[in-house]
Image (cartoon, rainbow, N blue to C red):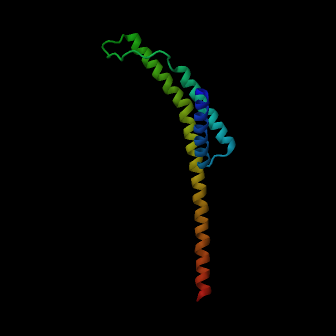
């Protein structure tokens, strides 16, 4: 029964995510690739999580040089992963929507120009 609840929850989350991506204007292929990317990222995050609880944080004075280097390397690896995977996908997504907004703005300007011409014509016809 617990598995049923978990699967229903993940299906509901997937539906919400899919609906949100559709509202953002993504086509089905783009939604599928975005969900696959999110799944890959989640798997990487899950594999990096430590099953044991982390020890109480120590102050800088209590940490050895090797421990500090290890912490810095771990955080550097996580930052590089973000820069190389997540940030690039986010930037590409923003660029895509920027292009869509510019395209829609151009269409809107064209429609406004048409409306202006039609309103002038209408004024002329009404005189």
Q: Position of residue 23 (x, y in %)?
A: 59, 49
| Residue most extreme to the left | 61
Q: Position of residue 110 (x, y in %)?
A: 61, 65
| Residue most extreme to the front | 1
Name above or below for residue 6 compared with residue 77.
below
Residue under the point 64% across and 41% down: 31
65 to the left or right of 3: left
Residue under the point 40% across and 12% down: 67
Q: Quadrant of the C terminus?
A: bottom right
The image quarter containing residue 36 is top right
Residue under the point 56% across and 20% down: 47
| Residue most extreme to the right | 29
Name above or below for residue 90 compared with residue 51.
below
Q: Position of residue 91 (x, y in %)?
A: 55, 40
Q: Quadrant of the N terminus?
A: top right
- Give 86 or 11, whichever is nearer the viewer: 11
Name above or below for residue 49 compared with residue 26.
above
Q: How many marks?
A: 0
65 to the left or right of 109: left
Name above or below for residue 92 compared with residue 105.
above
Q: Position of residue 6 (x, y in %)?
A: 58, 30
- Give 119 or 24, whichever is nearer the viewer: 24
Residue under the point 55% across and 23% down: 46
């Amino acid at each position: 029964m617990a598995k049923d609840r978990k699967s229903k929850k993940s299906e509901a989350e997937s539906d919400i995510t899919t609906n949100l991506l559709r509202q953002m204007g993504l086509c089905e292929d783009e939604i599928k690739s975005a969900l696959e990317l999110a799944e890959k990222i989640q798997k990487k995050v899950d594999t990096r999580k430590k099953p044991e609880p982390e020890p109480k944080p120590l102050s800088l004075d209590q940490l050895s040089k090797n421990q500090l280097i290890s912490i810095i390397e771990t955080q550097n690896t996580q930052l590089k992963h973000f820069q190389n995977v997540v940030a690039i996908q986010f930037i590409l997504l923003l660029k895509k929507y920027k292009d869509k907004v510019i395209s829609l703005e151009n269409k809107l300007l064209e429609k406004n120009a048409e409306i202006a011409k039609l309103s002038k014509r209408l004024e002329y016809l009404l005189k």
